[in-house]
Image (cartoon, grey):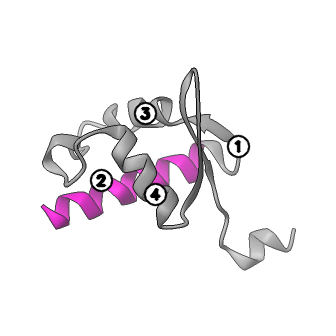
């Protein structure tokens, strides 16, 4: 369970970072991109019951900025790479 959770989290964060950078984006849109990969980890194999729970976890870990709107949950990737921050 922990291994699948870790893999899913890495896939989600990698997709968010590569495709959206530090732009604010709907969390469900990123999830839809993740599950398009035929080798993706199913969320029901992870410790998170819902995408909402997973997104809140990412926010508590300080990996993304999370905000809830009437249109759903939005996430913004927090860049940690010093070389990219210096640009």
The mark nearer the N terminus, 1 or 3, is 1
Q: Main secondary structure of the magenta part?
A: helix
Find residue 4 and report its image quarter. Answer: bottom left
Which one is nearer the viewer's eye here, 44 or 81?
A: 44
Percent from the top left, x then y, of residue 62?
A: 55, 66
Q: Residues within 10 Å of mark 3 (few under 14, many from 20)?
A: some
The CA span between labels 4 and 1 is 16 Å
The disc, 4 or 1, on the residue closer to the chain's N-terminal end is 1
As helix, strand or loop, the secondary structure at mark 2 comes to: helix
Task: Classify mark 4: helix, strand or loop.
Answer: helix
Q: Is residue 55 magenta?
A: no
- Label 1, label 3: how many angstroms apart (C-alpha)? 15 Å
Quarter of the image with the N terminus in it = bottom left
Is residue 66 something one can see in this rendering?
yes
Return the mark for residue 8: 2
* Mark 4–mark 3 distance (CA, rounded to whole Å): 17 Å
4 vs 2, front mark: 4
Give the residue pinned by disc 1: 23
**Residue positioned 19% across, 52% down in the render:** 46
Judged left or right of residue 42, residue 20 is: right
Q: Which mark is residue 33?
A: 3
């Amino acid at each position: 369970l922990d291994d699948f959770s870790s893999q899913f989290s890495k896939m989600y964060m990698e997709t968010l970072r590569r495709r959206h950078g530090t732009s604010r984006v709907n969390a469900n849109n990123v999830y839809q991109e993740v599950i398009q990969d035929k080798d993706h980890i199913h969320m029901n194999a992870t410790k998170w019951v819902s995408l909402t729970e997973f997104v809140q976890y990412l926010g508590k870990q300080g990996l993304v900025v999370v905000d809830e709107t009437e249109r759903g949950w939005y996430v913004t990737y927090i860049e940690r790479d010093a070389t990219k921050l210096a640009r």
